[in-house]
Amino acid sequence: MRTLLYQLVGVDLIQIHGIGPYLALWLIAECGTDLNRWHTAHHFTSWLTLAPGSRISGGKVLSAHTRKTNNRVTAHLRLAAAAIGRTNTALGAFYRRLSARIGKAKAVTATARKIAILFYNAMRFGMAYQDPGVDHYEQKYRERVVKGLHRRAAEFGFTLQPAQGVS
């Protein structure tokens, strides 16, 4: 099945974690092989109703929730995102980090959006997906957090120094 999909599309969609042969065929059947009608990945995720909403009135944000949808592709991407949360991949680590902070429902939506963006980039630009792994993701996350802590400390006139014997 994988070789037939590769011959049809020209990209190995199965490399993207969460996308199996069934979901790949479903995405191709619903979206087609030419994704040029969506100018960017943001347009594509908005069509899937996986992008945050922007209900603003008078400069006040009324709601940033995603819209409800009956889109079958979105439902399948959400199922794939929920399943990927149990895997030992970078996307799985992303899902687990978000679900601990904002809840499982929002983490499923965010992970489904990430999978949709990976699918869009693979189909539109032929980008190959290479999973960096959980350790790489956790290291990058730690670097982001430490950089933010240094920035916040500098705003208050403090400097941070690493503890002795702790990396």
Image (cartoon, rainbow, N blue to C red):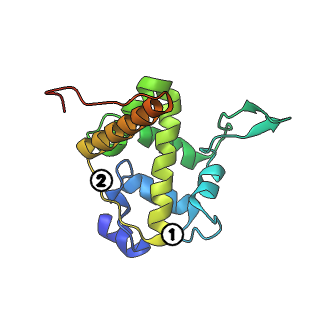
- State the residue at coordinates (77%, 37%): 55
Q: Quadrant of residue 145?
A: top left
Amino acid carrying label 1: it is Arg
> Label 2 belongs to which residue?
131
**Residue 166, horizontal then vertical, whole percent:** 17, 28
User: On the rendered image, what quadrant is the N terminus found in?
Assistant: bottom left
SS category of the residue bearing label 2: loop
Residue 103 in sight from this viewpoint: no
Position of the C terminus by quadrant = top left
Residue at left offset 30%, top offset 58%: 130
- The three-letter code of the residue at mark 2 reads Asp
- Real-space Cα distance between discs 2 and 1? 19 Å
**In this view, 154 is above or below 15:** above
Residue corresponding to mark 1:
124
Q: Is residue 111 left or right of residue 38?
A: left
Residue 54 placed where, x, y %? 72, 40
Q: Residue furthest right?
A: 58
Residue at 51% across / 61% down in the picture? 120
Q: Is residue 166 left or right of residue 149?
A: left
Name the element at disc 1: helix
Disc 1: CA contacts within 10 A as few (<14), some (14-19) or many (>=20): some
Considering depth in this image, is 6 or 47 the residue closer to the camera?
47
Tell me if residue 23 comes above or below residue 37 in the rendering: above
- Extreme residue in the left direction: 165
163 or 37, which is in the foreground?
Answer: 163
Q: Are marks 2 and 1 in contact (CB under 8 Å)?
A: no
Query: x%, y% of residue 65?
Result: 66, 33
Residue 32: % across, % down: 56, 66
Q: Which one is earlier in the sequence, the residue at label 2 or at label 1?
A: 1
Closest to the observer: 16 or 53?
53
